[in-house]
Image (cartoon, rainbow, N blue to C red):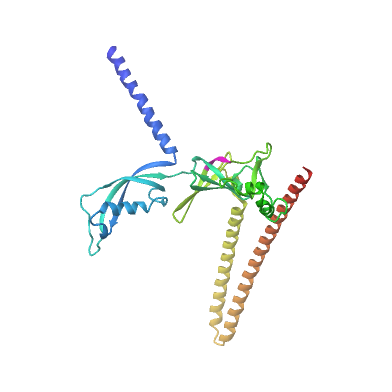
Amino acid sequence: SSPRKRKHRDEGSVGPSTKKHKKEKRSKESSEFILLHASLAVAIPPVFASNPAQGVEEMLDSMIMRYIPTLRGVVLTHSNLRFLQSKARIQDDCPYAICNVGFDAMVWSPRVGHKLTGKVILCSPDHVSLLVDRTFNVSIPRHHIPRAEWIFEWGPAENDPEYGAAAAGAEGATTLGSAVADKSADEPENLGRWVHAVTGEQLGPTLDFIVIGLTVANQMLSLIGSIQPDPFSPEHVPPAQEQSKHNEEDDDEEAEEEEAEDLQALEDGEAESSDPELDTFAELGKKADKMAAEEAKKAGKAKKRKEVEEKEKEKGEREKAKTNKKQVKAKDKA
């Protein structure tokens, strides 16, 4: 009986280390900062023939703060450079020495679903901009801000003689004006603010969000976030995307109709071409009339779209003017 008990004790002694290993692995996967052991094939220029390590170091330096697709993140630092081959290869007449190198890279690699914290730097009615680790840009669109909890309050208009930029400039000579002008650069731009509908508390200065998308442009990575309780729900799809989807479907239907008309016109043209008394100039005139009709049709569609955009723009301006008037009245009453 004693060996069996000893066996159970030995098996139990392995448990904590296994759990610790799983816990470390889980925490590593949930972190946006990852240490990778990477390898790379490099072509070293002949100018670094006497010191190839320096050439590779300069190549790796050019990757810092850039999004590298193979590493799936932004390279922050690199270290422990090592050559994986004792000899380099020169191919044909190319003077570059080709070899494989290994290195350790610290990568900022956020994933969809990660929960991060950023500092609010800009509030607008369309989105909230954040900075993560004072470096990386994050945008939270309006449809990913709970409308029932948060409302946007416009800031003073630029041409407001009492609260606008002109008034602040006029007071710049006074002590109070200089204090206003010397605001910290860390404060968000004064386009307005998002406030809680019940408590009136302002959104920020730091904000927790869920990553719902990644955007890569010019080797720079930016994030799209959400503060909705269910960020991946289809209810949060913006109306503009739905409208564009419907417009694409309408365009596809119109393209199919035009294609059918072209086929019918081609069949009619073939039928007419069998007639020996067909006038060539009359056929060219028909084609010109058809092209003119198509151009007029496209111009009409463009005009309708422009009218719709102008109406939406006017509606937004009216709503902004109403909001500003309400704020001015509230301040006058106070």
Instruction: Tell me residue 62's x, y (percent).
Output: 37, 54
What residue is shown at x 39% (from left), y 35% (from top)? 25
Magenta span has 148?
no
Q: Position of residue 175 (x, y in %)?
A: 65, 47
Observer-nearest residue: 283 or 215? 215
Give left or right: position of 216 versus 164: left
Q: Which residues are magenta?
A: 205-210
Quadrant where the N terminus lies? top left
What's the residue at 70%, 56% (across, down)?
159
Is the residue 23 above or below the residue 196 in the image?
above
Left or right of 14, for residue 65 = right
Q: Quadrant of residue 29?
A: top left
Quadrant hosting residue 252:
bottom right
Would you say residue 309 is visible in this rendering?
yes
- By secondary structure, the bulk of the magenta-drawn segment is best described as strand
Quadrant that contains the C terminus: top right
Residue toward you, 281 or 175: 175
The answer to which image quadrant residue 45 occupies is bottom left
Q: Residue 246 at x, y = what percent?
A: 60, 57
Q: Residue furthest front?
A: 174
Q: Is residue 140 left or right of residue 112?
A: right
**Residue 209 falls within the magenta-colored stretch:** yes
**Total labels drawn:** 0
Judge whether residue 72 can be spotted in this image: no
Q: Position of residue 103 (x, y in %)?
A: 31, 46
Query: Which residue sits furthest right?
Result: 333
